[in-house]
Image (cartoon, helix red, strand yellow):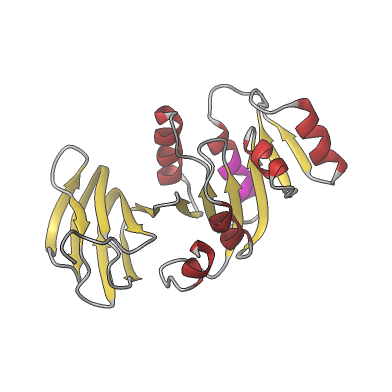
């Protein structure tokens, strides 16, 4: 059901250069399949390889310091012709290494799964490096929503079906922001992590427009329609 639904969501790209599987909370396999079918290559981050092995899916590349993946999983990946990139540095998280590998492989778009879960520090690190990444458009997926990191001056139009909710947060600050096509629009506002933001906004038009002149922010769209009480 989720896989069929994703194919009908116009705000998700039809193609990604890379799909990055991190070592966090596992997403539904249907979501993974839908994204894998849209991606040219699959990159496992360290222990993310363990989940792919359980699904019997061989990644094209595995990268990390390998402190959370078994030797048997790495041997399995090598046996099936995955390229192994050992990066022992502890000064940057595995997600930074994976994004750097994406760029070196010539990717311009990437989807990331498995970044959420109980390790809040890893979630924040993923968001931080996704917002810092240059020449790489990144979308972060959980089972519930897709997160779009927005950097610098951007103007985005998202086709959002009825019932899906959108939110927009400064990370930490985004200036001269305008949101249109929703119940609670705004114009030329500053979004701040500790101040003004848009939470669970309801689209009123087929297209939601988000304009940002400076700074960094995260725009989110729920993957499934939200049913409110009384509806």
Q: Nearer the viewer, residue 3 or 120?
A: 3
Question: Could you tell me which quadrant the C terminus lies in?
Answer: bottom left
Residue 42 shows in the view? yes
Classify residue 40 by image quadrant: bottom right
**Residue drawn at (22%, 55%) of the image:** 200
Q: Which residue sits furthest bottom?
A: 206
The spot of residue 159 in percent (x, y) is 34, 73
* Residue 31 higher or lower than 203, as above or below: above
How many tags in the picture? 0
The spot of residue 207 in percent (x, y) is 29, 75
The spot of residue 168 in percent (x, y) is 25, 53
Residue 105 shows in the view? no
Classify residue 79 by image quadrant: top right
| First to last magenta residue range | 98-104
The spot of residue 37 in percent (x, y) is 63, 64
Membership of 17 in magenta stretch: no
**Residue drawn at (57%, 62%) of the image:** 34
Q: Main secondary structure of the magenta part?
A: helix
* Residue 41 higher or lower than 10, as above or below: above
Membership of 102 in magenta stretch: yes
* Residue 13 higher or lower than 134, as above or below: below
**Residue drawn at (76%, 38%) of the image:** 84
């Amino acid at each position: 059901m989720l896989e069929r639904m994703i194919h009908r969501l116009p705000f998700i790209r039809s193609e990604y250069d890379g799909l990055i599987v991190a070592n966090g909370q596992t997403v539904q396999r249907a979501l993974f399949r839908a994204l894998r079918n849209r991606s040219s290559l699959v990159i496992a981050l360290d222990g993310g390889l363990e989940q792919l092995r359980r699904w019997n899916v061989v990644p094209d590349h595995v990268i990390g310091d390998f402190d959370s993946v078994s030797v048997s999983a790495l041997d399995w990946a090598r046996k099936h012709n995955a390229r192994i990139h050992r990066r022992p540095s502890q000064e940057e998280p595995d997600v930074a290494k994976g994004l750097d590998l994406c760029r070196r492989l010539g990717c311009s778009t990437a989807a990331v799964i498995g970044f959420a879960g109980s390790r809040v520090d890893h979630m924040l690190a993923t968001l931080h490096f996704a917002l810092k990444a240059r020449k790489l458009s990144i979308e972060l997926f959980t089972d519930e929503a897709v997160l779009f990191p927005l950097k610098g001056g951007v103007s985005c139009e998202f086709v959002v079906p009825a019932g899906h909710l959108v939110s927009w947060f400064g990370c930490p600050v985004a200036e001269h922001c305008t949101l249109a096509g929703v119940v609670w629009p705004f114009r030329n506002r500053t979004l701040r992590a500790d101040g003004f933001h848009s939470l669970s906004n309801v689209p009123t038009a087929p297209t939601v427009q988000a304009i940002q002149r400076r700074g960094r922010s995260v725009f989110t769209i729920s993957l499934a329609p939200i049913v409110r009480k009384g509806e």
